[in-house]
Amino acid sequence: GAGVSQSPSNKVTEKGKDVELRCDPISGHTALYWYRQRLGQGLEFLIYFQGNSAPDKSGLPSDRFSAERTGESVSTLTIQRTQQEDSAVYLCASSLGYMENTEAFFGQGTRLTVV
Amino acid sequence: AQKITQTQPGMFVQEKEAVTLDCTYDTSDPSYGLFWYKQPSSGEMIFLIYQGSYDQQNATEGRYSLNFQKARKSANLVISASQLGDSAMYFCAMREQGGTASKLTFGTGTRLQVTL
């Protein structure tokens, strides 16, 4: 596709369940990022991929959060045993490279609600 | 210390007027990039403008310009001739070159409301 695609766009889950969020970056983009945005707040960095490896996963809030990327393409963010504080919009972005002058293009996000 | 600071949680501007959104940053990396993104109520993040640390001139993109003052470590966004459609959240972000820390770090944002 032409842009970054995220699915699902909305997810409502029960507390304690696991969820998987998917990101399809722009074709050819080697860098991929996950951010979390709580209601009315800024973007909180979670993890960054260069190719299939994650040189920076410093933002993952707990061991319930994990992410992987395969084929230098699709990435999946998994949240295990979801808690209510995990409710947020999860944004994925990709960029052509990791140099300081490459802008990131964002998907529409997945709105996660934990009830 | 905050990497990116946006001190204006909310701003109002009248249609057709210019507005400046403030952004200061903190880095010891000599090579870095500064970005502004717009987030309308629909939630998408829209890239607006980029300024490189070595760029001699201020960046401009249509009605957007970046007032880059390197010694002050500020990168303010100027929107000229504001339109109602400019009402949105605006985020300043920085990417540093050093090491593997090439993630985009965002400020807390400024909500701009354009009035008639």
Image (cartoon, helix red, strand yellow):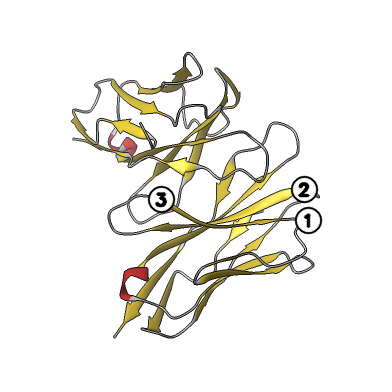
**Of helix, strand and loop, which one carries label 3?**
loop
Viewer-proximal residue among A104 and A59: A104
Residue pictured at 67% horizontal, 38% vertical: A99
Q: CA distance from mark 3 to mark 1?
A: 26 Å
Residue position for label 2 = B31
- Residue B15 lies left or right of residue B56; in this view the side is left
Above or below, comparing residue A46 to residue B9 in the picture: above
> SS of the residue at dot 1?
loop
Disc with the residue nearer the chain's start (2 vs 1): 2
Q: Is residue B98 above or below residue A81?
A: below
Among numbered discs 2 and 3, the one appearing first in the sequence: 2
Kind of residue indicated by mark 3: Met
Which label is found at residue B45?
3
- Label number found at residue B54: 1
Q: In screen coordinates, is A21 left or right of A68? A: left
**Are labels 2 and 3 assigned to the same chain?**
yes
Marks 2/3: CA–CA distance: 24 Å
Secondary structure at badge 2 equals loop
Measure how far apart labels 2 and 1 are at the Cα level.
7 Å
Proximity of marks 2 and 1: CB atoms separated by less than 8 Å: yes
Q: Nearer the viewer, mark 2 or mark 1?
A: 1
Query: What crowding class fits label 2: few (fewer than 14 Cα within 10 Å), some (14-19), or many (20 or more)?
Result: some
Q: Residue B84 appears in which quarter of the rendering? A: bottom left
